[in-house]
Image (spheres, helix red, strand yellow):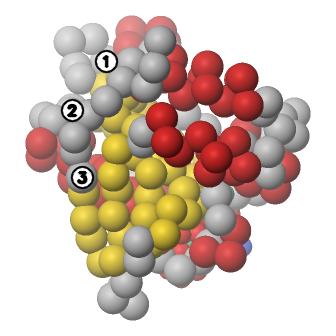
Amino acid sequence: MLLRQHNVVLEGVTPLGAIVRLRPITEGDWPYLEKWNSDPEVLYFSEGNDIKSWSPEEVRSIYRTVSQHAFRFIIEYQGKPVGECWLQEMNLEEINAKYPRQDVRRTQIMIDEKNYWGMGIGSTAIRLLTEFAFISQGVDLIYIPGIADYNTRSMTAFQKTGF
Ligand SMILES: CC(C)(COP(=O)(O)OP(=O)(O)OC[C@H]1O[C@@H](n2cnc3c(N)ncnc32)[C@H](O)[C@@H]1OP(=O)(O)O)[C@@H](O)C(=O)NCCC(=O)NCCS
């Protein structure tokens, strides 16, 4: 099984006028994804305390599996890949049970290049992904499954975007 392909490209501008582009993740992106998924600091914020690193095999398996039910994107800042985000069909039973007959999705984002944190890239990408979900996909509800209580940067980025 390979990554499910899609052809959605979303483009926006940060408050400082830099271009943020969300383009489909591809099988050519493994060098970035493997590097990013072995950074304990990024994983501390996205996965919690337990995961220090994913192996290359785990990375490919996880990404390919999730991509079957998601739009997965690489986030480019001024043309440089700096992170990733995705919009995924809801797969948590308790959430689907709570919102029957509604199109509920879950989302996640990582700016994996840490030098690029706090530059407005994350909130710009969240806005693009959210507009895509509600306007193009007709989604009813987007759910973020858990932001760690110590992750104020993430909370701020989502709150700024209207969550
Ligand atoms: C969370 C993340 C996606 C946010 O993206 P980003 O590009 O850094 O965020 P933005 O610059 O758009 O917005 C961050 C906001 O938090 C604020 N902020 C930055 N550091 C902060 C801190 N330590 N505490 C509180 N707020 C902080 C910024 O000032 C900014 O708000 P402002 O624009 O009103 O000033 C990114 O930092 C990241 O990938 N972190 C590691 C992985 C992660 O946490 N993923 C999310 C898991 S739920």
Mark 1 or 3: in front is 3
Inspect the image, locate mark 3, and give the three-letter code of the amino acid beneath it.
Answer: Val
Compare marks 1 and 3 and give the one earlier in the sequence. Answer: 3
Reading the image, the residue beneath label 3 is 9
Inspect the image, locate mark 2, and give the three-letter code of the amino acid beneath it.
Answer: Asp
Badge 3 marks a residue whose secondary structure is loop
**Up/down of 153 relative to 45, above or below:** below
For ligand 1, the image quadrant comes to bottom right
Reading the image, the residue beneath label 1 is 99
Inspect the image, locate mark 1, and give the three-letter code of the amino acid beneath it.
Answer: Tyr
Compare marks 1 and 2 and give the one earlier in the sequence. Answer: 1
Pinpoint residue 123: horizontal percent, then vertical percent.
43, 66
**Up/down of 62 relative to 94, above or below:** below
**Up/down of 18 relative to 133, above or below:** below
Reading the image, the residue beneath label 2 is 140
Q: CA distance from mark 1 to mark 2?
A: 10 Å
Circle 2 packing at 10 Å, graded few (<14), some (14-19), many (20+), is few
Assess whether mark 2 and mark 1 are in contact (beta carbons under 8 angstroms).
yes
Q: Report which quarter residue 96 is drawn in.
A: top left
